[in-house]
Image (cartoon, rainbow, N blue to C red):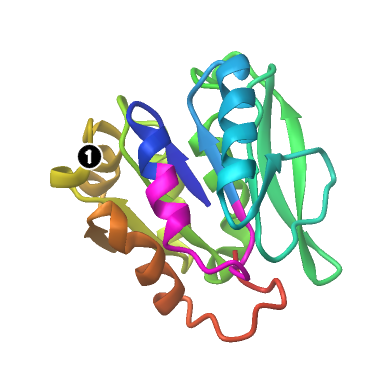
Amino acid sequence: MVGASTGGVPAIETFLEQLPKDSPPVVIAQHMPHGFLRTFVNRMDQSCVHQVGFARDDMRLEIGTVNISPSQDMQTSVFWRNGSWHIKHVKRRNGHLYCPSVDVLFTSGVPWAPQIGAAILTGLGDDGARGMLALRRNGACTIGQSKESCVVYGMPGAAFSLNAVQVEAPIDEIASILLARLNVKDLSGVKT
């Protein structure tokens, strides 16, 4: 799971460049209007070794895929069913300042936290900090982008201040740290 906002596009590109083609599935919540997200998804699908597309309701997450949360008045969450991860879209509520919301995405994984790696990248505000804290408290691997490598340290800084981040790292090291901490050997879809 990855959350980002301001400066997130190049950070996500760098993160994905560090992941092997057969990496566990990735779900990303990037604050951006849907039209810009569509352009970003199309460009990443053409330039990335992974299959990149929008997360669709009830889709099964596959090895080597990158699933971007749409921003069309719905929130993206994940759940585990029959041995694999799936997407569930939920209606945006009045209390959701951001759409897509990193907090909604991260919080949805709490019941399966020991199987999850979460990274919070550059961005304004504090979206994702509380969700990351819940993940960490329940056994997830949590990483924040280092201040020095962020365009804006708001989101990672907020998560760090809550003690939601196990380790901070430069953007070009986050993927390898996540994979190592999750001890990814069997890519059968158990880890995300």
Per the image, is 25 magenta?
Answer: yes
Relative to 133, residue 74 above or below: above
Q: Which residue is mark 1?
A: 150
Percent of width and height locating residue 132 = 42, 49
Percent of width and height locating residue 82 = 86, 68
Percent of width and height locating residue 113 = 55, 64
Mark 1: give few (<14), some (14-19) or many (20+) Cα within 10 Å.
many
- Name the residue rendered at 38%, 46% in the picture: 120
Percent of width and height locating residue 153 = 21, 35
Residue 165 visible (yes or no) = no
Camera-nearest residue between 137 and 73: 73
Mark 1 lies on a secondary structure that is: loop
- Name the residue rendered at 26%, 38% in the picture: 158
Residue 170 visible (yes or no) = yes
Classify residue 161 by image quadrant. Answer: top left
User: Quick check: 3 left or right of 144?
Assistant: right
Q: Residue furthest front?
A: 47
- Name the residue rendered at 47%, 65% in the picture: 140
Classify residue 44 by image quadrant. Answer: top right
- Name the residue rendered at 67%, 36% in the picture: 76
Badge 1 amino acid: Cys
Q: What segment carries the magenta color?
A: 12-26
Relative to 32, residue 88 above or below: below
User: Quick check: 19 left or right of 109?
Assistant: left
